[in-house]
Image (tube, rainbow, N blue to C red):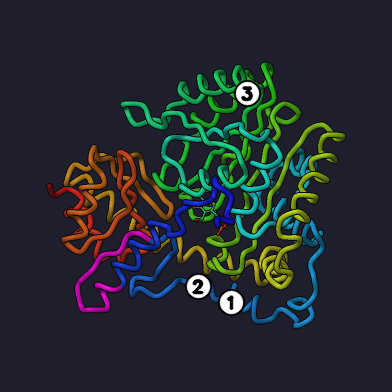
Amino acid sequence: MRHLIAAHASRPSDDPIFALNQEATTRRAKGEAIVNATVGALLNDDGSLAILPSAHDAITRVPAAEWATYAPIAGSGAFLDAIVADVLGTEPSLASASVAVATPGGTGALRHAIANFLEPGQALLTSNFYWGPYATLADENERRLDTYNMFTRSGSYDLAALDSKLTEQLATQGRALLFLNDPCNNPTGYSLSDGEWDDLVSILDRQSARGPITALIDVAYYTYAAGDPRRFVRKLQPLLGKVPLLFAWSGSKAFTHYGLRVGGLIATVGDEGERTAVQSALTYSCRGTWSNCNRGGLYAVTQLLTNAELAARCENDRLQLRELLLRRVAAFNAGASKHGLLYPRYEGGFFVTVFHQDAFAKAERMKARGVFVVPQKGALRVALCAVAESDIARLAETLAED
Ligand SMILES: Cc1ncc(COP(=O)(O)O)c(C=O)c1O
């Protein structure tokens, strides 16, 4: 007798990235010199997990009652105000049109966006290089995923492909939900240029006259971007009142506490009545999924964002990690150009992607040489966040070998 419903009877339980990491770890433990560029966590050059000391302090200072008590369903008001200010603090008109709910990591925020801004059976839209769980989240929530071509032949963002997919989706499903993971896209490492943001905003502005479009910006990695990570926020003003903006905020990378499961969904909605309805729908979704989040985690992150002394220390701690990562980015760019690797403009972030026609066979050959990367159709994802600077020359060389 089968008790699982047919549609769920053969779901894969293993995550291929975790399986590759396991294999790399086992071989390293046996004494092999392994380069493990699979895992999406920032490691120090000695292989230990990089942890912001200020974030650790904030967590150890959380009062016992904060850990023990339920959080409000939508998250504590102080936390929600803090994440809105963190993303939109420089744009008061956007901040004042925003509501938010706490979610278990950015993943929960993505889930709520899919469940509330698409009808069952409809497809979210994202670039053809995307974080794999987008598809899992869509599937789990009985939605689908559709993609546009991400890069033109010259290596810039293919905004024309995005534009025409929006036209198609508005025609076929009467609405669109765009997922844009920027800056520091996972897996490609790409960040839109200022000019590309201008063009994207004008496409969304124009298309929004044809039907309801919601744009979700997944800012999971934004604190590690080169330059001012909030630069893009200044571009968004023309969309207010036309395209609801969602921000999937994550404390996992920003505060190096992946297991704390602190995140939030911010919704910037011009129309006040719609904004209230969005807040209610998101709160209802919280109740109907995880009920409420980790109150102690919300408290610690609120302190990190709002306590002036702690926030300054945290900024400073993070700057050091950002510099660690930027040194690896520079080493990769040097090695990659020496060996003529084909990859998108890469200025910062946890990952970069190297294009390869036969990525799965190539990743197997690299594995045989002790270098682990994650293959996907047409490309290899390289998690520089996990690779010591001293290993990057070998990594680039192995990527270039036949
Ligand atoms: C692109 C992207 N978005 C969102 C997330 C969400 O992370 P979390 O749920 O741990 O906050 C991740 C984590 O790896 C990610 O890579």
Report helix, strand or loop for mark 3. Answer: helix
Q: Which-is-in-front pick, marks 2 and 3? A: 3
Q: How many marks?
A: 3
Check disc 1: other Cα within 10 Å, few if <14, some if 14-19, many if 20+: some
Q: Is residue 1 left or right of residue 34?
A: right
Q: Name the N-terminal-most of marks 3 and 1.
A: 1
Q: Distance from label 3 to label 1 (Cα)?
A: 46 Å
Q: Quadrant of residue 357?
A: top left
Residues at circles 1 and 2 in contact by the CB criterion of under 8 Å: yes
The residue labelled by disc 2 is 51
Name the residue: 22% across, 57% down: 395
According to the picture, the residue beneath numbered tag 1 turns out to be 56
* For the residues bearing labels 3 and 1, Cβ distance under 8 angstroms: no
Horizontally, is 179 left or right of 324 in the view?
right
* Segment colored magenta: 26-38
User: How far apart in space, not on screen, are marks 1 and 2 (Cα)?
Assistant: 7 Å
Residue at x 35% of width, y 59% of height = 38
Residue 307 visible from this viewpoint: no
Q: CA distance from mark 2 to mark 3?
A: 44 Å
